Image (tube, helix red, strand yellow):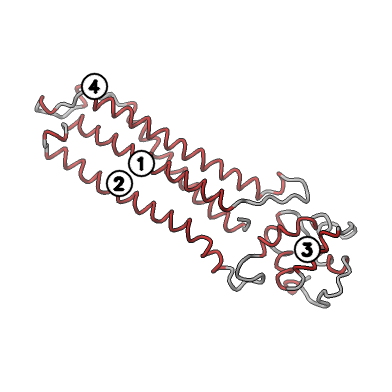
Amino acid sequence: MSSGGGTSVHITALDGIVNVNSLFTLAVFIGLAWNPKDPSNSLIDDPTCNPGPSVAEDLIAFHVYSFSSFLFSSLIAVGLKQGIRICRSPAYHPVGILCRINRSILRVGMLISGIGSVCGCGFLMLALINVVQIKLGTLGCGSSHTYAAVVPLVIFVPAALLIYISIVLYAFFRINELSLQVHGAGECGKRTSPDNEAFKLAPCAYAAQDENASVSSRCCAQVKKLGQNPACLCAVMLSNTARSSGVKPEVAVTIPKRCNIDSRPVGYKCGGLY
């Protein structure tokens, strides 16, 4: 993925995962700070409904599992965000080096981060069920208060997770199709975009910044190939990827002439300006 808009959408999505994880992590810490053996924390009237030690042990274990899942998810998301930002910033790269973000790796990383967040929510739900049992009595006692607290929990949380997973999977598997639809009428055709094609002009990075710099044969070959579609070549030279790598459009448009390409379009103005 190379388009600035696309990576911005992914950064926004990763920010959302991190923010949600942070909120639930706070709930986990509050749960860990709670003492389940404190008699004042219980509202149970019938001693036979008191939970055994295993419920308190499971409560701690589920809180730890939940925290580990949220931390794992957040670290993956933050790592992906940093990778995107580093690749998008030319300050991190020498002139002439372009960073390509691998769409498949980005998608898999986001999926793994989402799975971690879902697992964290699942473990947190199990921990809350144990909290209810400690406060209101075990499920085996059949307390109406216990079931009134647990039933909505086991209905709404899985339903919300199912909706979340469905939306995430839909976005991951349809993003290529949606991207192609957006660029379907683009200058470079249905299967690619000017930002993607800009990576092919990496050998032209120096020549596109200095009009007096020599143009390499590799650069001329790529420009001649793209020049078969002048609209695409212009779109590439004016793309976000080209600009972020330091390309000067007014210099870049002189490359076909400096390469002595006979088939270059004479009098054609890129964007109506260059």
| Frontmost residue, 45 versus 208 | 208
Local SS, label 4:
loop
Cβ atoms under marks 1 and 2 closer than 8 Å? yes
Give the distance between the C-alpha atoms of the residues marked 1 and 2, in whole angstroms: 8 Å
Give the distance between the C-alpha atoms of the residues marked 3 and 4, in whole angstroms: 72 Å
Give the distance between the C-alpha atoms of the residues marked 4 and 1, in whole angstroms: 24 Å
Disc 2: which residue:
157
Q: Is residue 133 above or below residue 116?
A: above
Local SS, label 2:
helix
Mark linked to residue 20: none
Q: Answer few, some or many: residues within 10 Å of disc 4's Cα (few below 14, many 20 plus, some between 14 and 19).
A: few
Residue 187: image quadrant is: bottom right
Q: Earlier in the sequence, mark 2 or mark 4?
A: 4
Task: Quadrant for the C terminus, please.
Answer: bottom right
Q: Answer few, some or many: residues within 10 Å of disc 1's Cα (few below 14, many 20 plus, some between 14 and 19).
A: many
Q: Earlier in the sequence, mark 4 or mark 1?
A: 4
Give the distance between the C-alpha atoms of the residues marked 2 and 4, in whole angstroms: 27 Å
Question: Residue 32, can we see it?
Answer: yes
Disc 1: which residue:
121
Residue 180 percent location from the top left of the image: 56, 66
Along the horizontal axis of the image, is 113 left or right of 206? left
Q: Earlier in the sequence, mark 3 or mark 4?
A: 4
- The residue at the point 22 percent across, 34 percent down is 132
Disc 3: which residue:
222
Cβ atoms under marks 3 and 1 closer than 8 Å? no
Badge nearest the viewer, 2 or 3: 3
